[in-house]
Image (tube, rainbow, N blue to C red):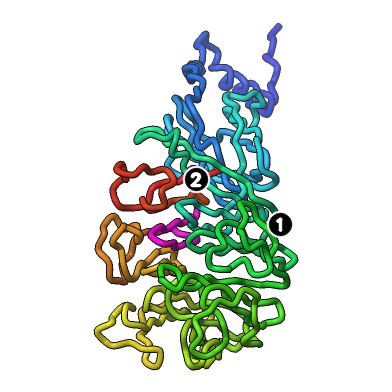
Amino acid sequence: MKFLAPRLNPLVVAALLSALSACGGGNNATAPVTPPPPPPPPQPAPTISGIAPATAILTRPTDFEVTGTDLVDGMSFQLAGCTAPTEAAGGSKTRRVFSCTPSGTTGEHALQLSASASVTSSLFSKTVNYLTPVAKVGEVNSKLTVLKEDGSLWIWENDWDKSTSTNIVTMNTRLGSNFTDIEVGSYFGMAIDAGGGLWAWGSNNDGVFAEGPQAGSSTPVQIGKDYAKVAVKGGNTSGGERMAGLKRDGSLWAWGSRSTPVPDDYHSQLLPHQFGSGFSDLATGTTGLAMALKPDGGLWSWNENISPTPFIPAKIGDGYQMVVSAYEANYGIKKNGELWAWGRNAVKRDLAATVDTPVLVGQDYVSLSAGSYYVMALKADGTLWGFGSNSEGQFGDGTSRGGGPVQSATGVRKVWAGKSCTVIEKRDGTLWATPFCTLGTMPGFLPPYGFHRLPQY
């Protein structure tokens, strides 16, 4: 009997062969297996050695520098009152910089630094003291009168009994609050409060206390009302100092030494007398011309002291938005940002600039401040320029050479000129001063000419 092999379905055979091929055929070979990569070596944990600065100015952008070892990308910087801090480019394992703008209230605020945004535990924590920014600075009797943006009024001065050439001790005395403007003379200060009240302190030798105590006062006393601005004139003159005041209704008033409106009379006028109306601003600067602006940009001036026509304003220019006056040197910024100068000691005096033929000094200026014999001007790009006398380094350019224009600093937000003292605020909120501001310096131990950092409170 003959047996026949069963007929296999070709489709089944093909499926079996495919399965055998996937399993390595019908032999005992094993497919190679790639081993997983070894785990990365553990990274050292970041360590923080310090975070600076310990103080920050409210509303002013601040850079906080973090130093340490093994600092990594993506670290979490958290500071109360500073929302959405950003890390500056160019950080390294030993240095990172975080920027933010403090907001809120003065005082201590908590700062924490973590390894990453997902790690809640803090690598480093400290407190940062928030300070109120300065609105205006004046120099009176070797002291700095400081008005802060919260309206508080302070005196910053060197404690000469305790300071040495290597250890400067300063005093910070609060005089009052709710003020909006200040102005200083040689031996007195004045401030205007939020309601227009005019206050004075110091010496009253020249009768500048108006309706206040004629003996003067060591603390602010109210001497008038409804004022918008005041300016001191007559500094460094034998005739003494007098005041010009702009009231809120646009009227001009005068009082103090040699302020009588009587022609050719040198007597003082202790009570303020009105001599003009319709004005919007006063020129500052203790020496030089007395000037005021009207809302249309018209510039007006008047004679003081002994004159056939005292305190009679006359128009001398147009198109100005700000004017200041130093000794025989007058500077004004026009509404288009042009800076013009005139007077015997003004820049480019070889061109014989006068009030009738002022000289164009430059463009893009935004602010002016006049000292006794010099003027500081600030451009929109933050560069600072000096004009006039620089004999005591008041330009801050590191020399005592005067003239102008002389560029002395960059990154400047505000400038205040005094007798021989210039104070600036940089855009980071820090304050800097020239040597003869006396705060932070000692007679005989003055630092080299140039700006030095002031302590802030």
In the picture as drawn, the residue positioned furthest to the top comes out as 1
Q: Is residue 120 above or below residue 77?
A: above
Residue at image coords 54%, 80% = 321
Q: Is residue 11 above or below residue 30?
A: below
Percent of width and height locating residue 411: 43, 58
Percent of width and height locating residue 446: 32, 45
Q: Which residue is mark 1?
A: 178
Q: Which residue is mark 2?
A: 157
Q: Secondary structure at mark 1?
A: loop
Q: Is residue 137 left or right of residue 213?
A: left
Three-letter residue code for mark 1? Asn
Q: Residues within 10 Å of mark 2 (few under 14, many from 20)?
A: many
On the rendered image, what quadrant is the C terminus found in? Answer: top right
Q: Secondary structure at mark 2?
A: strand
Q: Is residue 201 above or below residue 41?
A: below
Q: Is residue 335 visible?
A: no
The residue range painted magenta reads 410-427
Residue toward you, 397 or 206: 206
Residue toward you, 233 or 396: 233
Q: Is residue 275 left or right of residue 165?
A: right
Residue toward you, 107 or 41: 107
Of tags 1 and 2, the one toward the viewer is 2
Q: Quadrant of residue 391?
A: bottom left
Three-letter residue code for mark 2? Glu
Given contact means CB atoms under 8 Å apart, are the residues at marks 1 and 2 in contact?
no
Residue at image coords 37%, 78% = 328
